[in-house]
Image (spheres, rainbow, N blue to C red):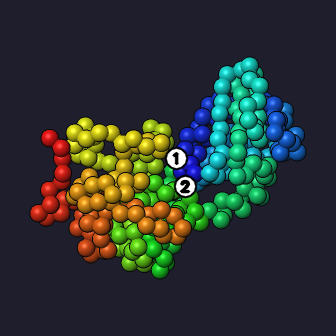
Amino acid sequence: MPEGHTIHRLAGRHRELFGGARVAVSSPQGRFVDGAALLDGLVFETAEAYGKHLLHRYDGGLVLHVHLGLYGKVSDGVMPVPAPVGQVRMRMASDVHWLDLRGPTACEVFDEVQVAALKARLGADPLRDDAGDPGDAVRSSSRPIFALLMDQSIIAGCGLIYANELLFRAGLAPTTRGRDVPPELWGSMWTDLRALMREGVDKGRIDTVHTAHTPEVMLRAPRVDRHGGEVYVYRRTGQPCHVCGTAIARSELAARNLYWCPSCQRPPGRAGRTPGKPRRPAGRPARISR
């Protein structure tokens, strides 16, 4: 499922392509005919993202709400619009550009009351300027910090990769209860998450390793994975930690895949390093190929 940075990139892209344009909206697949009829011929005013939710705003107060889910995809191009390929839920076209939406979990027309209700049930989006710090919700909970990071009602837009990587960078055991995370540690983690996700918006991929652990510096092969990006623990089960060499572990927590380094990630008071600054355990030098 796309994480929040991808949805923010899409919102920016759609503002650039369609902002201020009158658009034709249709549903080649036939599953969004009524919604498309409401939007057809309106002016596309802007687009915004909130967590993993994409919102297209049209004149007259109507809003298209899209949640891509696991299978949703968006494509676009320059006119003329091609013949539909596959199951196109919604097609939008201006005089210059076209956009196709396939396989979303949600594709529906909202009014502002429904938009407000959607936002009310979501937590803080690290990529929005109006995001408040969700520290109180985190530190009042007895649930594992990993589960709290994945809870969209607490942090909107943080997905599996960011949650796993953030905890490694903080040197924090994923099963640590939220209430056991020291306030200063949470503050550093929140700042780190916002910075990582903003970089994801800029680069279009998730990179979480520090300069000292990049392939160029460590003289190792770049990561090969369909998700792309250089990471510390995500989908690296059994591979050596870039910091200490310990094999990366995997299990399930909150019905999601959890990845961590048993040596680098410790409960509060035993973490041994500052968030964003990977430690090197005493007597265990980092394994760097020569």
Residue beneath the point at 51% across and 72% down: 137
Which residue is at the front of the view, 106 or 84? 84
Give above or below for 6 relative to 13: below
Circles 2 and 1, Cβ within 8 Å, touching? The answer is yes
Which residue is at the front of the view, 177 or 262? 262
Q: Is residue 178 left or right of residue 4?
A: left
Residue identified by numbered label 2: 157
Residue identified by numbered label 1: 5
Dot 1: few (<14), some (14–19), or many (≥20) neighbours within 10 Å?
many
Using the rendered image of the protein, determine whether residue 189 is visible from the camera's viewpoint.
Answer: no
Residue beneath the point at 82% across and 35% down: 28
Residue 268 location in percent, x, y? 31, 74
The image quadrant that residue 23 belongs to is top right
Q: Which mark is residue 233?
A: none
Residue beneath the point at 44% across and 38% down: 203
In space, the residues marked 2 and 1 are separated at their CA atoms by: 7 Å
Residue 223 location in percent, x, y? 36, 42
Q: Earlier in the sequence, mark 2 or mark 1?
A: 1
Q: Amino acid at mark 1?
A: His
Q: Is residue 257 left or right of residue 51?
A: left
